[in-house]
Image: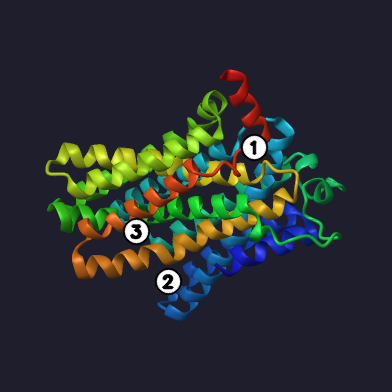
Amino acid sequence: MAGVVGSGRLVRRVSTRPVIMVGIALVITGVLVIAVGSSAGAALIVFSGLVFVGIGSGLGEVALNIDAAALEKLLKRSVLPTLHGCYSLGTLVGAILGISLTAAQFPVVWHLVLSSIVMAGLGLWAILSIPGGTGASSPDFGSRFGLTTARRKRSVWLQPTVLVLGLVVLAVAFAEGSANDWLPLLMVDGFGLTGAQSSTIFAAFAAVMTIGRFAGQPLIQRLGKSRVLIGSVVLAAIGVVVVSVAATPALTVGGVVLWGLGASLGFPVGISAAGDSSDRPGQRVSAVTTVGYLAFLVGPPVLGFLGERYGLREAILLVAAVLACATLILVTNDTYVSVREKRKARVTR
């Protein structure tokens, strides 16, 4: 969370590319430190590595979202869902690879070392491949994308659009984080499934998230960000309720699919909508992203506390309630809808 909070300030000073580079470097360093700690059996060293990974991830992810939102403005089409789809794909591939190497009894230390080498190669290639006009190498990037603070203006946190999108992204991030942390245990404790079955269902959730994000760009082009955002939140809410009340395995899987599809686009589309404005879009993206990661940090522990007291099937209804509130906010407020979408809606009527 420290990396998430500090990333926006760093981007305003040096733009996105250096922040992304530092974030990747910290993550790679953290993974190597974890490898050293694991081989030495030193918990404190492992903890230090996790700190590096956490700070680096926060720094890099916020800067990447800001860069992607700027790229959307240059290309005049949506790319954030695809970017988040790559994140989900990486998570899915990493999980499958980890399970396979564990089954093959491959040493954890060498797994981490090889992973850091792959990350270094991919990270270096990606950074060098970022076009100059959308990164730190563009001299006027900061001023064009609203990252300078020369003029004193009202804080972006007080803008109605940021408040609306922040609350919606918070709700969707809560839904995604809850599934990431609790879905396998929910399948075991709430439905009596085996560990292998619960892992399969979670893998299905991750796969649906990945597919939904890669399908986001054509959906946004066809329906617009506002409709996709509302539909995503509604789908996620329905999916959570179905999982909570499901009486059969088939219904449970159906609910998980809806949950994953809804959660897949809410976060990236919300961030994309935050970057639509000409008034400091970079700071708006940073603010909305920070709120989303706050939900990832705080939401799952709250759900775990309620699950211990009332049961996980009952506790996840809180996720549905938060999503329902987000839906109400979206349908009763159009401050988050871009001027271009409003004009398009008037033309089609």
Which image quadrant: the C terminus?
top right
Q: Residue at x 23, y 39 (%)?
A: 253
Using the image, determine if residue 140 lies above or below residue 4: above
Which image quadrant: the N terminus?
bottom right
Q: Of the residues shown, which amino acid type is indicated by label 2?
A: Ser
**Disc 2 to disc 3, C-alpha distance:** 23 Å
Q: Residue at x 62, y 31 (%)?
A: 342
Q: Nearer the viewer, mark 1 or mark 3?
A: 1
Q: Residue at x 78, y 51 (%)?
A: 146
Q: Nearer the viewer, mark 2 or mark 3?
A: 3
Find residue 129 and report its horizontal and vertical position in percent: 71, 40
Q: Of the residues shown, which amino acid type is indicated by label 3?
A: Asp
Residue 181's disc number: 3
Q: Which residue is mark 1?
A: 338
Mark 3 residue element: helix
Residue 125 visible in the displayed image: no
The colouring scheme, among rainbow, by chain, secondary structure or one colour, is: rainbow
Residue 38's disc number: 2
Sequence-first disc among 1 and 2:
2
Q: For this rendering, which residue is in front, 153 or 72? A: 153
Q: Residues within 10 Å of mark 2 (few under 14, many from 20)?
A: some
